Image (cartoon, helix red, strand yellow):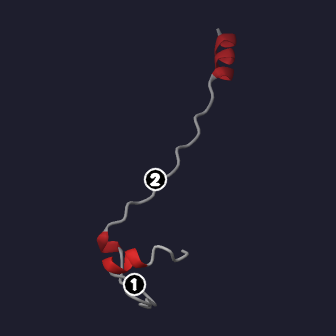
Amino acid sequence: MSDFWHKLGCCVVEKPQPKKRRRRIDRSMIGEPMNFVHLTHIGSGDMAAGEGLPM
């Protein structure tokens, strides 16, 4: 009988540990922008005029 358990043990593979899930963030965890520099404003009319510009 012990031979049976020995053979069975070789077929059982330990499952890999699941990756830890990241803690979900909400709005209360997000602060104000730091070192923000407003370079320019693009309005909806400006989008059509700038289609030929490289990104």
Cα distance, mark 1 to mark 2?
26 Å
Q: Can you say whether 51 is above or below 32 in the image?
A: above
Sequence-wise first label, 1 or 2: 2
Residue located beneath label 1 in the image: 33
Residue at x 41%, y 90% (from the top left corner)? 38
The answer to whether residue 54 is left or right of residue 38 is right
Query: Residue 18 location, x and y as percent?
Result: 52, 44
- Residue 23's label in the rendered image is none
Q: Horizontally, is 22 left or right of 2 in the view?
A: left
Count of numbered tags:
2
Horizontal and vertical percent position of residue 8 = 64, 17
Tell me where residue 30 appears, x and y as whole percent: 36, 75
> What residue is drawn where x is 63% and y is 28%?
13
**What residue is drawn where x is 41% and y is 89%?**
40
The N terminus: image quadrant: top right
Marker disc for residue 21: 2
For disc 1, the neighbor class at 10 Å (few under 14, some 14 to 19, many from 20) is: few
Give, as a three-letter code, the residue at label 2.
Arg
Q: Local crowd at mark 2 within 10 Å, few (<14), some, or many (≥20)?
A: few
Q: Give residue 46's position: percent from left, percent from top.
A: 37, 80
Q: Secondary structure at mark 1?
A: loop
Q: Secondary structure at mark 2?
A: loop
In the foreground, 23 or 5: 23
Q: Nearer the viewer, residue 50 or 2?
A: 50
What's the amino acid at mark 1?
Pro
Farthest top residue in view: 1
Instruction: Report the side of 44 relative to 12 (left or right).
Output: left
Image quarter of the C terminus: bottom right
